[in-house]
């Protein structure tokens, strides 16, 4: 790793890019880095960071050494009495309150054994990047609450248009370069599977990654951004020369990995 740093402690991005390029250029190996290749690499780095942070938090909070996390181990400020069913229980569902945390923990506990293993704990810490359907439903429910003005747990067209459509539109515009963005009426009709002119939480699942994007979702958008910024000849892919010429925009991605060393049991791709 020292070879990538100057005597003044500055990261030599050019050397890193020269080393990294063959790893990126692999599907196919044709001398160019395409968006899907860059996205795959950025997603792998995001996954590594999530695993790293999860393992560190697990080691920090696993008081009994069973390689799993109980609710009390992770959030000890809430007692058993706080989470009970008595009149003194603190089961409020406001953001950050006892019931709110308890619901998150319950959603992540797939096997319902009262503790979270590594993968369940990772879902708990990074819910937007989880594949857990219960967590998705919970996130969508939370997203729906502030825009569900009549509190019927459904979205009318106006509630959808004023509260969600712009979020969806911004991401789709970025994906498509501003072209072919569906009108709100068309999106609503497509999502309204039962045709009752209302959208339930379950019907919002197809656009979950737009409404609650996590690090893995952002990997796609960041790859698109890097291609757009460095693609001088606008052919939709990058040469090594183009990447070196615009090396400053790659600095952030490389620096984020500097905190993950070989001692952390993560593969080092740079």
Image (cartoon, rainbow, N blue to C red):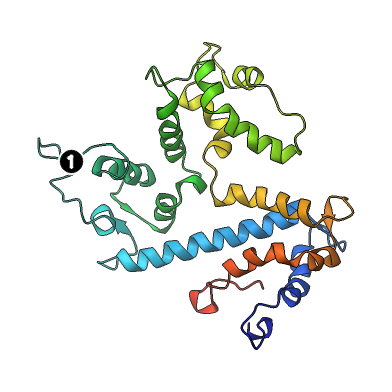
User: Whole-percent x and y of residue 243?
Assistant: 79, 64
| Furthest-front residue in this view | 8
User: Whole-percent x and y of residue 207?
Assistant: 58, 32
Q: Is residue 17 above or below residue 227?
A: below
Q: Is residue 222 above or below residue 8?
A: above
Is 172 placed left or right of 25 in the picture?
left
Mark 1 = which residue? Answer: 90
Is 11 placed left or right of 91 in the picture?
right
Q: Nearer the viewer, residue 155 or 50?
A: 155
Quick check: can you spot residue 103? Answer: yes
Q: Nearer the viewer, residue 123 or 172?
A: 172
Crowding at mark 1 (Cα within 10 Å: few <14, some 14-19, many 20+): some
Q: Residue at x 57, y 73 (%)?
A: 258
Judging from the image, what secondary structure is the residue with disc 1 in? loop
User: Whole-percent x and y of residue 266?
Assistant: 54, 71
Q: Residue at x 72, y 28 (%)?
A: 181
| Furthest-bottom residue in this view | 7
Is 21 placed left or right of 73 in the picture?
right
Q: Residue at x 58, y 34 (%)?
A: 167
Quarter of the image that includes the N terminus: bottom right
Residue 190: image quadrant is: top right
Quarter of the image that includes the C terminus: bottom right
| Furthest-left residue in this view | 87
Labels in figure, total: 1
User: Whole-percent x and y of residue 13?
Assistant: 71, 73
Quick check: can you spot residue 110? Answer: no
Q: Residue at x 84, y 50 (%)?
A: 236
């Amino acid at each position: 790793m020292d070879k990538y740093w100057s005597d003044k402690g500055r990261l030599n991005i050019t050397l890193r890019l020269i080393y990294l390029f063959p790893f990126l250029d692999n599907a196919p190996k044709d001398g160019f880095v395409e968006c899907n290749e860059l996205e795959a690499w950025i997603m792998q780095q995001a996954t590594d960071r999530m695993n790293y942070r999860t393992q560190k938090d697990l080691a920090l909070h696993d008081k009994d050494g069973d390689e799993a996390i109980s609710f009390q181990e992770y959030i000890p400020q809430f007692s058993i009495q706080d989470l009970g069913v008595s009149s003194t229980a603190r089961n409020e569902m406001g953001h950050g309150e006892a019931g709110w945390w308890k619901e998150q923990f319950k959603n992540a506990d797939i096997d319902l054994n009262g503790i979270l293993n590594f993968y369940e704990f990772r879902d708990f810490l990074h819910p937007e990047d989880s594949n857990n359907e219960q967590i998705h439903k919970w996130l969508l429910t939370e997203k729906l609450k502030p825009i569900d003005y009549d509190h019927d747990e459904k979205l009318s067209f106006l509630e959808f248009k004023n509260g969600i459509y712009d979020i969806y539109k911004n991401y789709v515009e970025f994906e498509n370069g501003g072209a072919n963005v569906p009108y709100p009426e068309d999106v609503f009709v497509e999502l309204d599977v039962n045709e009752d002119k209302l959208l339930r939480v379950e019907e919002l699942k197809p656009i979950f990654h737009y409404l609650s994007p996590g690090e893995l979702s952002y990997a796609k958008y960041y790859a698109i951004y890097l291609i757009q910024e460095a693609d001088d000849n606008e052919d939709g892919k990058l040469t090594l020369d183009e990447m070196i010429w615009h090396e400053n925009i790659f600095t952030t991605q490389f620096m984020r990995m500097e905190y993950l060393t070989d001692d952390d049991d993560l593969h080092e791709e740079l």
